[in-house]
Image (cartoon, rainbow, N blue to C red):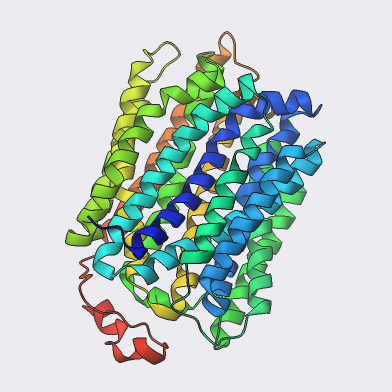
Amino acid sequence: MNWSKEDTILAVIVIGTLMASIDSTIVLLAFPAMTQALHSTISTIIWVILIYMIVVAVFSTQFGRIGDIYGRSKMFNLGFVIFTIASFLCGIAPTDITLIIFRAVQAIGGALIASNSSAIIADTFERHKIGRAYGFTGMSWNIGALLGILLGGVITTYIGYRYIFFINVPIGIVAVILGLKYVKDKNKTNDKLDLYGMAALGIAIALISYAGINYASVGLNSLNVVMLVIGIISTIIFVIIDRKIKMPTINFSMFKNKIFKNSLLASLFQGLGFMGVTFLLIMYLQGVRGYSPLYASLVLFPGYVVSGVLAPYMGKYSDKFGARILSTIGIMFMVLGVLFYLLVLGVTTPIYYVVIGTIITGLGGAMFWPANNSAVMANVSGELRGSASGTLRLFSSLGLIGSFIIAFVAAASAVPRYLAFEIFAGTSKVIGGIGKGFVAGMHVAFIALIAMLIIAGIFSFAIGKENRMEKLHHPGETGTYAKSRNLSAETER
């Protein structure tokens, strides 16, 4: 097979996904080293992860819309530059606070990359080929998670935790060079930025996310309630603003397409239901079973392998048969995997049971992610792809944050919150009868997470049939895409 320009663009996208994925797991194994070297505490250093989650959630949609207007390639390549520079700054950060600040800057770069990469894929590949492309991004995410686990353990142990950030620098430089040369804009609009809408949305997501995470950290208090209320009010203001203006941050007409809408909701509830499982398993392996962070992460290794190997093939099948069947079956496998954990995990359960569970859920992930992501991006076109890509990232990020909250609230029902954070970071473990209480709380959380996954499966099944061989037009578009048939006809079918 000849290597094409499209393949080069996909390779650049894959590098971006790989970098983001490596950083999602590589930090997990460095908490003890960072805490000691920076004379910090676990309750503070945990924000190295939390700030990244919040910043990506806050800016994803806005950066996607900015990409629609000023050029996705410009925003994508700018994201690489920011991510690379911030990675270096994280590596030289002298204190825990400066490290958290630089991680926030790094997250801005990550949000620019993530919110525009899906749109660039949709611009580059025809609708009946994008599932395969998203399959490769899914594969790179899982490979990156594996590399993060392995490199994080090796680098932290033998070289020093600062090099978990420095490793991004040469990769980022290569990605910037390739991106500037090959990733070019195909669709831009002449719209103006919805500054008021962007501000209202950013405030809403920041306050709601922080209120939820603070609740998981310290419990319910007046500050959480006030922030949540203001966040909800800001959300209402955002909806009012964006429904009245001609060029909104989120074009709500996209949601008239049931495939687009249901795929987004499936992504949200899948994130709510699945990521918490990973958090709980890490806490179980480190806290109840007493394994080191590296060994605990390696127990989860098989699931990443299965998902990474199979994702491109599953993405290709979604191009041929549509997303509905694969994404729904994928959710069913995830439900089966979590149900398996619920039934078998105890204080002394053989560890290979966890490995079996990771294989089951890994198979489900290989089916769901490429199919669902391609369903979102295959059913919005042209000038709105950046907004759609950013909205998809937003929904996924909100699911991740919500799942984190579910996991830690469940853990805090059995152990003090400070101990839950220490267990997650691998610096402490439960002893005596507390382990049984922790497992009982984990089982309650599994039930809640299964409920979230079932809802995700319902939305996946509700996607309905799709034909990716047809051209697509979205209501309100102009120019080339206006010549295609109206999307509402497809929506009503």
Farthest left residue in view = 321
Relative height, residue 372 to residue 41 (above, below): below
Query: Where on the picture, by quarter, is residue 287?
Result: top right
Q: Is residue 143 left or right of residue 336?
A: right
Q: Residue at x 45, y 56 (%)?
A: 13
Q: Who is closer to the viewer here, 228 or 101? A: 101
Q: Horizontal and vertical percent for residue 31?
A: 66, 28
Q: Nearer the viewer, residue 93 or 349?
A: 93
Residue 437 visible in the picture: no
Q: Quadrant of residue 425?
A: top right
Which residue corresponds to the image point at 56% horizontal and 80% vertical from the top-left? 248
Which quadrant does the N terminus fall into? bottom left
The quarter of the picture where the C terminus appears is bottom left
Looking at the image, can residue 266 be seen?
A: yes
Q: Position of residue 4 (x, y in %)?
A: 32, 62
Percent x, y of residue 215: 67, 43
In percent of the image, x 34 and y 40: which residue is there?
308
- Horizontal arrangement in the rendering, residue 223 relative to residue 407 (left or right): right
From this view, report whether residue 25 is shown above or below residue 351: below
> Which residue corresponds to the image point at 68% horizontal and 23% vertical from the top-left?
32
Residue 151 point in image, percent of width and height:
53, 29
